[in-house]
Image: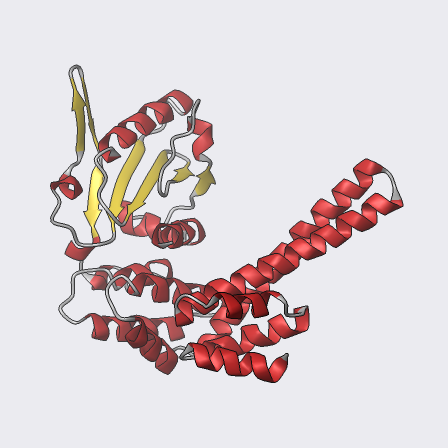
Amino acid sequence: MYDNVCKFLAETYSQDFAQWLLGEAIGLTQISPSELSVEPIRADTLILLAAQQLILHLEFQTQPQVNIPYRMAEYRLRGHRRYPDQPMRQVVIYLKPSRSELVYQTVFEISGLRHEFEVIRLWECAPEDLLSFPGLLPLAILCGTPDKVQTLHQIAQRITQLPDRNTQGSVAAATAVLAGLVLEKAIVQQILREEIVKESVIYQDILAQGLQQGLQQGLQQGLQQGLQQGLQQGLQQGLQQGLQQGLQREISLILRLLRHQLGDLEPGLEARIRSLSVDQLEALGEALLDFRHPEALTAWLDRHT
């Protein structure tokens, strides 16, 4: 989950990462890792961002892994084969403090081959270096600071100064997730609730986007299936299947949010949620962030079903 949040940040705010790592806010165009692969390397998180004269390769890690140096060397060779005239800047960014010697490895070396890459250990960075960039605000809480709570207050204040609600929502949601690595959930919720408009707005946006995407994907699949069959019956079945898939995506998203809010749910509660209508699910999506214990969810279901 944490690696995926960092991947989202790097893709969405690539210029902020370029300014931080390269010293210049150049425009970066994302390229797929498969472009460098005969057999794709399975990485926890891999971002390849190509500028005109540079490929920036970012790897985010919550835990050290022994094969990181090998992966970096292999991708460097593949990058050279695909883009022989472009240099590649490779950076491994470790999110959680570790005493392992692996987080200090910056070289892959075997007989006749030596490859170097960079490593950033966020807990050794100053949060002030990241607080000026919207896309880096969520990472600032992982930097070295004696008072994580005060740092989160600073981040929350900066978020409220961002120019539009969508940016505020994305950055706040990413901050909430990454802050969970170093702070208790209750503390994170308290600070963000105090200083970021309304927490519910953030997750309602996420919920709406997830529902819209699910419905669109489902409808598209249904239409394609119906057209291929060439029959009205096939089209209708495809549309129904698409709508059902969209509904299932909404249910899955709401269950993930509830588990994040309340922890694991009893099978009986999960079954009741899966039986809700679309309107009931939307209402639950608006209400769930006010729940503080499973009994509140049970009471809501008793009132609305």
- Is 22 or 154 nearer to us in this picture? 154
Residue 250 percent across, percent down from the top left: 59, 62
Relative image position of residue 190 (x, y in whole percent): 33, 79
268 lies left or right of 175: right
Q: Foreground: 20 or 178?
A: 178
Specify how the rendered protein is coloured.
Answer: secondary structure
Q: Quadrant of residue 173?
A: bottom left
Q: Residue at x 15, y 16 (%)?
A: 111
Vertical placement of residue 181 versus 56, above or below: below
The residue depicted at 16 percent of the width and 66 percent of the height is 145
Looking at the image, how many numbered discs can be counted on the residues? 0
Compared to residue 229, the image places residue 236 above or below, namely below
As rendered, which of 115 and 131 lies closer to the eye?
115
Seen in the picture, residue 242 relative to 150 is either above or below; the reply is: above
Q: Between residue 270 and residue 201, name the one nearer to us.
A: 270
What quarter of the picture does the N terminus occupy?
bottom left
- Horizontal relation, residue 205 to residue 22: left or right: right
Asked whether residue 227 appears in the rendered view, the answer is yes
Q: Position of residue 19 (x, y in %)?
A: 32, 51
In this image, 272 relative to 180: left or right?
Answer: right
Residue positioned 22% across, 75% down in the render: 150
The C terminus lies in quadrant: bottom right
- Identify the residue shown where x is 28% and y is 37%: 90
Question: Is residue 198 something one can see in this rendering?
Answer: no
